[in-house]
Structures are given as C-alpha cells and as structure tokens.
Amino acid sequence: MLELQNISYNAEDENGKKEILKNVSLKVNDRFVAITGPNGSGKSTLAKVIAGIYTPSSGRIILDGEDITDLNITERARHGISFAFQQPVRFKGITVKDMIKMAANKEISVAQCCDYLSEVGLCARDYIDREINASLSGGELKRIEIAMIIARGTKLSIFDEPEAGIDLWSFNNLINVFEKMHEIIKGTILIISHQERILNIADKIIVVADGEIQNIGTRDEVLPDILSSAGTCHVLTDKM
Amino acid sequence: MLTEIQKRLLAEVADLKAAPKGAYNIRSDGESAARNTTENINIVTKTDKPGIDIIIKPGTKGEDVHIPVIISRDGYQETVYNDFFIGEDADVTIIAGCGIHSTGCELTEHSGVHTFYVGKNAKVKYIEKHYGEGEGTGERVMNPSTVIVMEENSYMEMETAQIRGVDSTYRSTKATLGDKAVLKIGEKIMTHGRQSATTDFEVDLNGVDCGCHVVSRSVAKDDSKQLFISCMNGNNRCHGHTECDAIIMDNGNVAAVPKVNANNVEASLIHEAAIGKIAGEQLIKLMTLGLTEKEAEERIVNGFIS
C-alpha cells in the first residue's frame, strides 16, 4: 500500500514561490487507480514526488509500511516503483533490447523481449535492434515505454498520461494492456489520465485541482461528477 | 613469438587472439613480426621509407586484410607509410589499428600515413582502432593521417575508434571523390585526464553525384579537450553531410569548426553539431529503472560511443 501524508511541494520561478501541491494525503491500496484533473493541477508533480524525481517540501511517503521519503530515485525503483514518462526520453546508441534488459534487470532472450513488445503491439523482430533515437516516432516510443514497465513488473507502476500521442488503434489496446498487466503483476497501477475510457476501468479515481485533492472515491462515486463537469465554460462546452 | 603484452594489444586493436585468416601484416616495434599474403592480396615492404604497399587484385571479393601495429618499447617513435591499392570491382575489409604499451617517462609515438586508391566500382570497409595503456608517465601519441582517392562509383566506409589511453592525437583525413563515389566516415572518440584530440576532415566532392557522410561522436571527460574540424567542398552536383555530436563531462571541452563550401549550384551540403552534457532526463529515466546515477552515466556514454 502507498500512503501520502501531508505532501506539499513548492516550486520557485521568477514570480517567487508557487505551491504546486498543498497538503495532499491519500492511501492507495487498489489494483487500478486513476488520477485526473485539469492541466496544471499538479497531477504529474504528484507522480514525480512518488517516484522520487521531486523531493516534497514537507510530508511523508510510506510504501508497504516503510517510510521512503528520503530514498532517491534509484532506491525507490529498487523498492518496487516504476514510472512511465509522459514524454519518453531518447538515447543515441541504446537499443530497444538494451532498455528492456535494463528494465527487467536481467539477461533476457529475444523470445522474452518479444513477450513484452507484443503486449504493446510491436513486433520484436522489427524493433529490438533499433536505437531509442529520433528514428522512432512518439507513438512507438510511448509503447516501448509501457513495455519497459511490464518488463519491470513492480508492485507499483505509475503512468503519466499513457494515452498522449498514441493513435486510436493503440489506445484500444492500451486498455487491454493495463487489464492484462494487473493479471500478470498483481500490483497497483496508478495512471494519470484525462480519458474517460481509462477512468472507466479504474477502481478508484482521484481528482486533483489546484494542488489539492478535490474528490476521491470509486468510479461510480466520482465519474458522474467529472462528466457533468460543473464550472466548465459554456462557450467551450457548446463548441464540443 | 609475441609477449603477453603484445598479445593483449593485438586483442584490443584488432580483436585478434591468434593469427588472422587471409592476408595480414603485424608490425611490432618497427619490425614486421608476421606476414601472410594470398593469391589476391599482396603485401610488399617499401624500400624508400618505412611501411608497406597492400595490393589488392581487381575483382577480389570478401577477403580481409589485417595490418595492426603494436608498440611496447618505451620512447619508440615512428612514422609509417602504408599505401593501399584496391583494384576495380574488389570488395574487401581492411582492419588496421595501433596499440601502445608504455611504462617509462619518454614520449612514444606512432604516426601512420595511409593512402587509399579505391578503384572503379570497388567497395572497401576500413576499420581503425587506437588504444594506449601502461603506467608510464611518458605521453602516448598517435597522429594518423589518411588520404583517400576514390574513382568512379566506388564506395568506402571508414570507422575509427579511440576510446582509451591515447594522450594526444591529431587525425587528418583528406578525400577526393570521383563520379558517383560514396564515402562514409564514422568516428568515435573518448578522451579523459588531460588528453587532447583533434580531427580534421577535408573532402573534395569533385565527381557528379558523389556523396560524403561524416558522423563524429565523442565524449570529453575530466580536463580533456577535443577539436573537430571539417571542410567539405562541393565542386559538382553532390551531397555532403557532417554531423558532430559530443557529450562533455567534468571540465571537458569540445569545439566544432565546420566549413561547408558549395562551389556548384547543385551541391547540397549540410552540417550539424550538437555539444552538451548528458541530458538530466536521460539520467532520471535510467535511475527509475534501478540504475544508480553513476551506472546511468556509464550506460549512456557507452551507448553513445559504442
């Protein structure tokens, strides 16, 4: 179980200090949790605080009863946290197979590589020797990013907007990927998403707005509220 | 008989554990330690200056030539002239390389002057590795100079690597391309400590529809310095492309000085240069896979110049 206790995160820019996360507390113990909310609400920051990429200004993070607040990114990864970037990183000279091998943290065969890549709709034969460089499209990189999380198979997997940059075909498969992933890994999957269809398969939905948790509950409790989207500008909704 | 040190140098620069198949010439401390020729490839010692002529018969297909140089004598300095005559329609791989082991305080130096005459329709792959080792304080210096003359429709690929142990390098590569000739050069350099490396390319794209691609990837660590100079002269309808991609670490310094010179309205010349430290997000990504920052750094650098 993951528990956040009174997490705050401040960032500084030219206009001074800005509070990105304000005293966020929550417990995640479900198989499938979605975090949603408007752009700039602090969702990605929250995910990065959990992965250790950002250090919170205050508050504690507890994973399975252990305080991991002071652990760095590497140590948290080794404690069973995986993080899929919203914008995957490119590497010159590192191949898809190298990356999957690093993710799996062991020597893997082409057949095993194929297992992971086929889950995200990529044929291993075409991809394993390709470099993770500019020759791959954004969508391909995104799928490889997800395959790496599957290869890691940790107890907590965080996805930052996995649907961004993925075409419709892949998107349909993405839902299957998450469902299957849970069957295989049995851990908690935490997804930041704006997509109704992803929210639809969540056991728990957390709505973040302006650095705070605005709503939290089961799909049936939270989803109707989001869809009626109280407060949305009428000029925009009329045009949609 | 080769010593253990000589054997190790050979393994480093030429991936050789035993005498290679096919034609070879192993030069050790200025002497020809072993040589083999084949029906199609002849190796002849020059009479006017140190070095050899490597003569490859027209139409020779799929043969390799190994010409490694090893130096294990402190303070030994040499300039060696090797000329390659590659016959029409030949398709061969040439593996050169130089390893220096020095334990003393004297300067040890190898300057190889290689000239390639690539015949009509011939294909050549040329691989060159430089390596230095030893506890000595004496500088290990290698100044390779390569001249390439390419005839019509010939193709040459040149891969050079200098990853460890060479204190100072000045590499000069000059090429002249005929009609439809294509030259590809891939260079990998890593410097550390107080090492310095300069590479200087000058390519004359003289033939119609000829093309040249130079890709240089380098890493400069500690207090090392690198200078990348390239000059491409487009004298006909041709394509030229140079790319200098460098990672700097610690107090490393890399400068890129490109010159693309179009003398013909149909010449298409491109230069790209990118120099910078390892991207923070690359380190973070690998750390989220469980690597430490140091391991992530090594992995990124190794990938970059492997």
Image: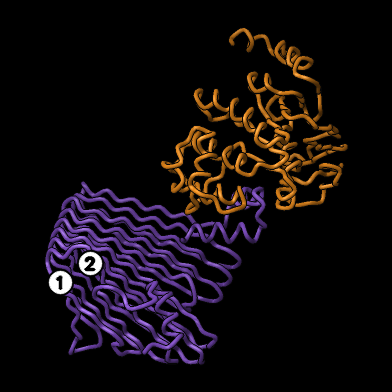
Which chain contains the residue that carries disc 1?
Answer: B
**Badge count:** 2
- Residue A3 lies, with reference to residue B146, above or below; the image says above
Q: Is residue B185 left or right of residue A130?
A: left
Q: Position of residue B140 (x, y in %)?
A: 45, 83
Q: Position of residue B167 (x, y in %)?
A: 48, 79
B265 or A223: which is nearer to us? A223
Same subunit, tags 1 and 2 = yes
* Residue ID at (22%, 70%): B116
Instruction: Name the mark on residue B143.
Output: none
* Residue ID at (53%, 88%): B136
Q: Position of residue B280 (x, y in %)?
A: 62, 51
For the colour purple, the matching chain is: B
First in sequence: mark 1 vs mark 2? 1
- Quadrant in which the N terminus of chain B appears: bottom left
| Quadrant in which residue B131 is drawn | bottom left
* Residue ID at (59%, 51%): A102
| Residue underneath mark 2 | B63
Instruction: Name the mark on residue B40.
Output: 1
Give the amino acid at mark 2.
Answer: Glu
Label 1 close to label 2 by CB (< 8 Å):
yes
Give the amino acid at mark 1.
Answer: Asn
* SS label for mark 2: strand
Q: Is residue B267 left or right of residue A200?
A: left
Q: Colour of chain A?
A: orange
Which chain contains the residue that carries disc 2?
Answer: B
| Quadrant in which residue B53 is drawn | bottom left
* SS label for mark 1: loop
Q: From where the camera sits, is residue B11 visible?
A: yes
Q: CA distance from mark 1 to mark 2?
A: 9 Å
B200 or B73: which is nearer to us? B73
